[in-house]
Image (cartoon, helix red, strand yellow):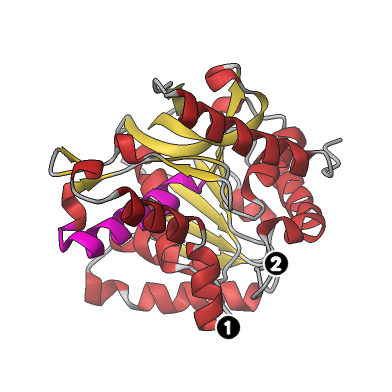
Amino acid sequence: MARAKVSIIGAGRVGSTTAQILAYKELCDIVLWNRTAETAEGIALDLNESAPIFGFDVNIEGTGDFSSISGSEIVAVTVGAQRKEGMSREDLLATNSGILRGVCEQVKRYAPESKLVVITNPLDSMVLLAKSVTGFPKQRVMGMAGILDSSRFREFIAKELGASVSDISALVLGGHGDFMVPLPRYTTVGGTPVDELLSKEKLAKIVERTRNAGAEIIKLEKESSAFYAPAASLALMIEAMLKDKKMTLPCAAYLEGEYGIRDIFMGVPVVLGANGIEKVVELKLKDDEKALVKLSAEKIMGSVRGLKLN
């Protein structure tokens, strides 16, 4: 059986680490595209030379030619300017919208049947732009953020409790940024609700740290933003689709009335399978949770107003 083909646009730290994870798992053949072709070619060569050691049999191609993405089942877009210390994700809107528009025009041309995953910031606005440029149906366009935010929430809870991250189930809704909405009520540790194990004060501190987790890493690393956890989150989405796992994962999805929200992408639980986003899962939220989700949506709408979609 022929392997699926996945293309990663951008050979920076997130893109190259995602390629590494996909290769080690033998999930697919990989095309790694970069504006500077030699960079992508060098990374691909390095990864291919590790194959005999790790024992994976996939082909990794580095290129600067967009035609190489033809036939891709999934295209993941990781290109874009990174945040610097003191910047918000919204500060990247003007720069990254121009970059993403050009990339999506090429995806539409060479991989019109692909499923498109965007991680470029500001995430929710950029996924909407990707849908507008490509004209792809909503099931085949999505953003990676909720998995990352939920993973950070789980890690901070695990450290606070001295528990295994594997025992923690957590969910973060809303936009990717300061107005993400962690849901302690839907968070459990070995089946026990987290609010029975942590005080409101400690939970509030963890929620706040989750919202600022990306900025915390930028402050520490100075010249780099997070890439290990984002790459792992992206790889999980790709695996769920390639294996048709029907996994329920928090992703940025296009909403048409779900949660009372329309015409934007926002982080919500979805069923992810071979067809892309196969279902948006609507949780029963309390009034205070609904208010936070609504506020998050309003912030996304404010960002979208500054975006030229056509």
Percent coordinates x, y for residue 228 in the rendering: 41, 67
* Magenta-highlighted residues: 144-164
Label of residue 13 in the image: none
Relative placement, left or right, of 98 versus 296 is: right
Relative placement, left or right, of 176 versus 35 is: left
Percent coordinates x, y for residue 113 in the rendering: 59, 32
Q: In which quadrant of the rendered image does the C terminus lie?
A: top right
Residue 1 is at least partly visible in this image: yes
Residue 243 is at least partly visible in this image: no
Q: Earlier in the sequence, mark 2 or mark 1?
A: 2
Task: Let me know if residue 145 is in the magenta part.
Answer: yes
* Residue 60 sits above or below residue 154 on the image: below
Q: Residue at x 65, y 72 (%)?
A: 37
Q: Which residue bears the numbered disc 2?
A: 81
Task: Let me know if residue 274 is in the magenta part.
Answer: no
Image quadrant in which you'd find residue 96:
bottom right
